[in-house]
Amino acid sequence: MRVHGSRVVCVETCSCALVRGPSAVCVVSVVTRPGPLAVSAARPALSPRQEQVLLLLGDGLGLGEIAARLSISEWTVRTYRDEGRRRLGARTSAQAAVLVREQREQAR
């Protein structure tokens, strides 16, 4: 998954008949946010690690890649991801990544 402004693009490596070769990339879905996703001030803040995991997911890294980069288990990555999503009120990891990026931009 990659975050591009207000769009979240999910990609997958495949070997379907629509593309050439097994290493080609198919766009699985593009999610465009209809409007600003506000985060309530009443929600608890994310921990630095939850933020980091959600940002890395937004950069397109998988759970295993994040675990290796941060020297933690894949289950711990899932826990940070799920708790971060819960705290933000996001339905998906992609939505949570967008929210974290927006919060960081607003803080600047």
Image (cartoon, rainbow, N blue to C red):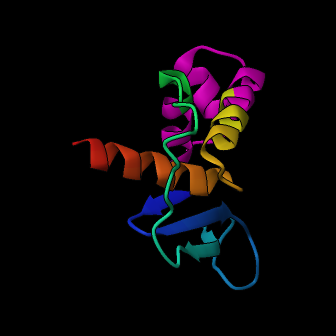
Q: Nearer the viewer, residue 75 or 102?
A: 102
Q: Quadrant of the N terminus?
A: bottom right
Q: Which residue is drawn at the image coordinates 21% and 42% (left, top)? A: 108
Relative placement, left or right, of 55 versus 83 is: left
Give the residues in magenta: 51-79
Q: Is residue 12 above or below residue 90?
A: below
Tell me the quarter of the picture where residue 44 sits: top right
Whether residue 22 appears in this view of the structure is yes
Q: Nearer the viewer, residue 90 or 74?
A: 90
Please identify the dominant SS of the magenta region.
helix
- Residue most extreme to the top: 71
| Magenta run includes residue 58 | yes
Q: Position of residue 96 (x, y in %)?
A: 58, 50
Q: Is residue 75 above or below residue 55?
A: above
- Residue most extreme to the left: 108
| Magenta run includes residue 26 | no
Q: Which residue is drawn at the image coordinates 60% and 68% (left, top)? A: 25
Whether residue 59 appears in this view of the structure is no
Q: Which residue is drawn at the image coordinates 72% and 66% (left, top)? A: 14
Q: Which residue is drawn at the image coordinates 56% and 33% (left, top)? A: 53
Q: Position of residue 8 (x, y in %)?
A: 53, 66
Q: Is residue 41 above or below residue 26?
A: above
